[in-house]
Amino acid sequence: MANISNLAFVHPEAKLADDVVIGAFCYIDRNVEIGAGTKVHSHVSILSGARIGKNNVIYEGAIISATPQDFRWKGEESYVEIGDGNHIREQVIINRSIHKEGKTRVGNNTFIMAQSHVGHDSEIGNYCVLGNSVKVAGDVKIGDFSILSSHALVHEKCQVAEWVLVKGGCRVNGHVPPFVVMAHNPISYYGVNAYVLKKANKSEALIDDIAKCYRHVYQNSASVYNALRRIREDIEPSPERDSILSFIEGHKMNLAGVPKSDIED
């Protein structure tokens, strides 16, 4: 049987695994599901549409599945889906989708620090870190193993690829390709995320090839269109090289830190 404080409210229709812990002054709404091993600290609100997996820890004052902050939402029933092994710190707010049956998603083993906000229909990957007071707007995608440092802000419909580091206070207003570090305002390319890639046992040769790819994209005078041609000619094929090419082409060469005039000749 779940361990529920007698100072908490749990709606009788909520579905809680037997070993879930609910702290004092929590509010657990109808149409909520919480998986085994999850601990909910005091003063947390988990609202209708939350689907929370196993072994998560949710800290004081967080609000999960808050109604969307978007005028397009007209009361449709929608969801927030959170995977397993996540830490969601104090006063984090995660909004549910604006679409009927739609979902805002957080993957597995992700750490969302205090006072961060995840907007409607956004997707946060696995093993990500969102620093203190990070703001993620609606319809954003954050790839696996990416880190957004404190006070970073991601604009609506932007995508941050995997293995990215966004430095503190940076405003992301375009698509960020994989394996890079982005910084400053306006946002600009800061280098390859070499430290984290080394921690993931990526070889020096591979990291060097990734750096060569981005020298063509960000540090030469060529357009992005010509940079893609040079990458194919100069860099040995690898899953990482192909991931870079696929991301850039998939986003029509519209990258954060690249002026619109530099996309094509």
Image (cartoon, rainbow, N blue to C red):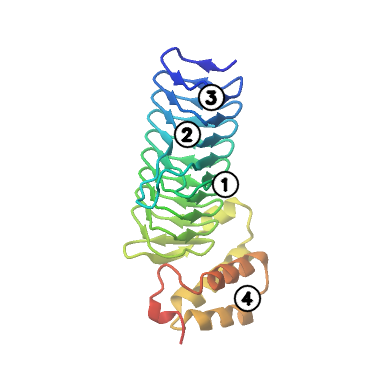
Number of numbered discs present? 4
How many residues crowd mark 2 within 10 Å: few (<14), some (14–19), many (20+)? many
Q: Which residue lies furthest to the bottom in this view?
A: 265
Q: Nearer the viewer's eye, disc 4 or disc 2?
A: 2
Q: Distance between the residues labelled 1 and 4?
A: 28 Å
Q: Distance between the residues labelled 2 and 3?
A: 10 Å
Q: Nearer the viewer's eye, disc 1 or disc 3?
A: 3
Query: Residue 265 placed where, x, y %?
Result: 46, 87
The kind of secondary structure element at disc 3 is loop
Q: Distance between the residues labelled 1 and 3?
A: 30 Å
Q: Nearer the viewer, residue 226 or 159?
A: 159
How many residues crowd mark 1 within 10 Å: few (<14), some (14–19), many (20+)? many
Q: Going from the N terminus, do you reach mark 1 or mark 2 first? A: 2
Picture disc at residue 48: 2
Name the residue at 56% across, 45% down: 127
Q: What residue type is labelled 1?
A: Asn
The kind of secondary structure element at disc 1 is loop
Q: Which amino acid does label 4 sit on?
A: Ile
Answer whether labels 4 and 3 touch (C-beta < 8 Å): no
